[in-house]
Structures are given as C-alpha cells and as structure tokens.
Image (tube, rainbow, N blue to C red):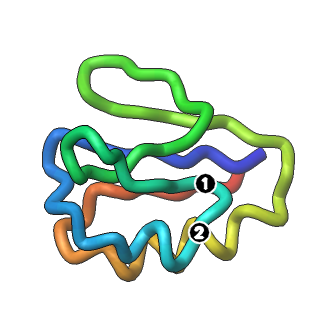
Amino acid sequence: MVIVTLQRDKCIGCNYCVEMAPAQFQMSKKDGKSVLLHSTEKKGFFTIKSHDDSIYEECVQAQKACPVKIISTKKI
C-alpha cells in the first residue's frame, strides 16, 4: 500500500508535483495550489491510501522535487 500526504496550506504553487506525478496531483484554478486527487482532508493534511504500488515512484519524485517539502510518500 502507498500512502501519500500533502500539507496543502504551505503549498507555493510551483507545479513540480504535477510535472512528476500528474495522475495524483493537479493545480487548483481557484487558488493556484496543488491538489492531491481523491484525497481525504484531516487538520490541513490531504491523504490518499492506494493499493496501486505503481504510483509510488512518481510520488517519490514529486516529494523530492517539492521545494517546500510538504509531500510525504510511504510504502507499507
């Protein structure tokens, strides 16, 4: 299982996550910040839990590319 978390409030809208993992992230037209698709929100953290291990590498690349370090990717 892959768990991806985005701390959206701290997003600066650089778009790197969308470039690295377009199937999981997109930019909001409303406020210019990243959106973690199909996520649930709890206390400002947006999380997806996926049984599709193929998303792991893209999400790790998005995590590494993020200049404000607000993306977390775990494989359990």
Give the residue drawn at x 60%, y 66%: 22
Q: Are marks 1 and 2 in contact (CB under 8 Å)?
A: yes
> Residue 16 at what x, y percent from top left?
38, 76
> Residue 62 at what x, y percent from top left?
47, 72
Residue at image mark 1 = 24
Q: 5 above or below 55?
A: above
Quarter location, residue 35: top left
- Label 1 crowd bin: few (<14), some (14–19), many (20+), radius 10 Å: some
Q: Which amino acid does label 2 sit on?
A: Ala
Q: 63 above or below 49?
A: below
Instruction: Name the foreground residue: 49 vs 12.
Output: 12
Q: Please indicate whether residue 72 sits to the left or right of residue 28 in the image.
A: right
Instruction: Name the foreground residue: 32 vs 52.
Output: 32
Give the residue drawn at x 69%, y 65%: 56
- Label 2 crowd bin: few (<14), some (14–19), many (20+), radius 10 Å: some
User: Which quarter of the rendered picture does the N terminus lie within?
Assistant: top right
Q: Please indicate whether residue 33 sits to the left or right of residue 22 in the image.
A: left
Give the residue drawn at x 64%, y 73%: 58
- Secondary structure at numbered mark 1: loop
Distance CA(mark 1)–CA(mark 2):
6 Å
- Which dot marks residue 42? none
Task: Point out the residue furthest to the front here.
Answer: 29
Instruction: Name the foreground residue: 28 vs 56.
Output: 28
Q: Which amino acid does label 1 sit on?
A: Gln
- Secondary structure at numbered mark 2: loop
Residue at image mark 2 = 21
How many numbered marks are there? 2
Q: 13 above or below 64?
A: above
> Residue 10 at what x, y percent from top left?
14, 49
> Residue 41 at what x, y percent from top left?
40, 22
Q: Please indicate whether residue 50 sits to the left or right of residue 33 in the image.
A: right
Give the residue drawn at x 50%, y 78%: 19
